[in-house]
Image (spheres, grey):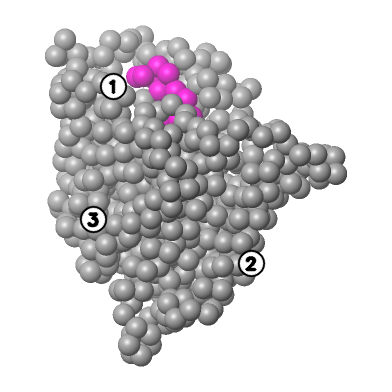
Amino acid sequence: MFLQLLINGLIAGAIYALVATGFSLIYSTCKFIHFAHGAVIAFSSYFLYWLFSLIGINFWLSAIMAIVFAALLGLGTNVLIYQQLQKKKASNVIILISSFALLILLEALILIFFGADVKTLGFLKVAKGLPFLGAVITPLQIVIILGSLALLGLFLFFMRKTKLGKAMRAVSDNKNVAEVVGISAKKIYNWTFIIGSAIAGVAAILIGLEQNLEPMMGTNLMIKGFTGAVIGGIGSVPGAVLGSFLLGFAENFGIWFLPSGYKDAIAFVILFLFLLLRPNGILGIKKGGDKK
Amino acid sequence: MIEAYLIHLLILIGIYLILALSLQLVVGYTGLLNLGHIAFYGVGAYASSLLVLNLGFPFWIGILAGGIFATATGFLLALPTQKIKGDYFALATLGFSFVIYAVLLNWTSLTRGPLGIPGIPRPSLFGISFSSNISFLILVIIIVIITYILIKRIVYSKFGRVLQAVRDDELAARTLGKNAFKMKTYAIAISAFFAGIAGSLYAHYITFIDPSSFTLMQLIPVICIVIIGGLASLRGTILATIILILLPEPLRFIGFPSSIVGPARQIIYALVLLVILIFKPKGFYGKLKLT
């Protein structure tokens, strides 16, 4: 029982971490909350469903196109909405509201295009769980856990070793100084959205394989990913991943004490408490939000 | 037929007016983006329905209790969050509304969870029944007028001026000896009371409630109204409520299936909100921008 809960926590944590990584990257560089990130994931999952299940394109090709689609969708939100707002010196609160509006806009579009009923990708046959020291885990779930860790490793390598990654960290640390040394913050913001949303595309594929698709999945994923990011420290990507796994464990061990219906409530209570008591999270260095 | 439809729209406008005017008190006059407002609406709806249905209380006790329970919820939200600001306040209040939603959904012995509460009776007050829509509309109009007068008096009172001072410069207000935290807490509690009243009216009008009626989705039109009307403008709030409730109505007549009309409404609200935020962030009559 303990081991099964541990594994369930790991799987949930890996999924939340996939959501939190892109979200937290965007937050740490651009310094505003992109809640529509969840809808980007949901939309990309549906895009994959459309290509693979409805049109019948090869799965791997569809998956690559879904990642490209996610990156473009994220870039589009930045160019069409956030950049326009920032040009007018909109406050973080305004940008936050606009990201909710975007979230609801994208979810409503999913409802119109695909309807309210649940969809399944149907790429993998329902695999029998492998017994593992008395607990059960499916091969796909192992892929999700390993995939999210590998993605994180790749991402950290990218942030530390490539020129673009270094420029993103520079803008994140101090935008003005970065611009003085010739880094265009606007360009870096666009790249941040492209990379953060491409990670959302990967998340969309793995989550689409593991769970059913439903129009509101974006909001649910975003709440969990956001909570994970807040627990770990919203401006720090490794912190967000750590926080996501902690949230996965907290939820799954929590139902030892509480009826399972309260699983979501555990996340909300943790989110509320962290925002009140420790808004910088466990690993968060500094607060990037409104400091006024 | 057309008459019944108009009455229905006017009742909806009335309920949204109470909700939007009360949110305006907190967002516009106090400068706090409270995304938990919808939770007060939900608590008011549930408290009133359960008292009237299960314990047989008369409607007027139900609606007052709806307001009082919502006020208590308001204190519950305001006391811990009084020191956080800006987008963190918005997110903490959003988290709070999720907690309330989860409680409504999971406390099945009381709320019946996702099944919702059917058969909430139409109100009757002092022997007068408000079961027909036209009489219900009159009741709503009376409550809207009372709400408007009270909120207007609050806003122009000494307390209201202190709220605006806290919004414009909290440090300065505190330097002058005003207890900013207490003021903000009261503002949230008062607005929660009116939201609870609106929730009770909604429950007794529709006669059915379930937790999904009290989520972020339902809050978006109200936030739209407050921003489009203009922050700290009661006149703008009224105008925006009427416009925004009527705006998606033509969708019904174009002949879209109902599975499209719902999301199409959401799209309209989301687009209107985005356009206003980008091109006219002060709304119709607003004097200030949200910071």
Report in which chain the residue with disc 2 lies.
A
Report in which chain the residue with disc 3 lies.
B
- Residue at the farthest front position: A58
The residue lying toward the viewer, choosing from A21 and B154, is A21
Where residue B277 is drawn, which disc sits there?
A: 3
Q: In the image, what residue type sits under mark 1?
A: Ser
Q: Residue at x 43, y 34 (%)?
A: A53
- Residue A21, given in percent of the width and then of the height, sits at 53, 61
- A38 magenta-colored: no
- B212 magenta-colored: yes
Distance from label 1 to label 2 (Cα)? 46 Å
- Residue B96, given in percent of the width and then of the height, sits at 52, 46
Q: Residue at x 36, y 32 (%)?
A: A114
Distance from label 1 to label 3 (Cα)? 29 Å
Which SS does the magenta portion mostly show?
helix
Q: Earlier in the sequence, mark 1 or mark 3?
A: 1
Q: Is residue A284 left or right of residue B261?
A: right
Residue under label 1, please give it: B258
Tell me which segment is drawn in magenta.
B203-219
The residue lying toward the viewer, choosing from A48 and B290, is A48
Residue under label 2, please give it: A282
Name the quarter where the N terminus of chain A is drawn.
top right
Q: Nearer the viewer, mark 1 or mark 2?
A: 1
Q: In the image, what residue type sits under mark 3?
A: Leu
Distance from label 3 to label 2 (Cα)? 34 Å
Q: Secondary structure at mark 2?
A: loop
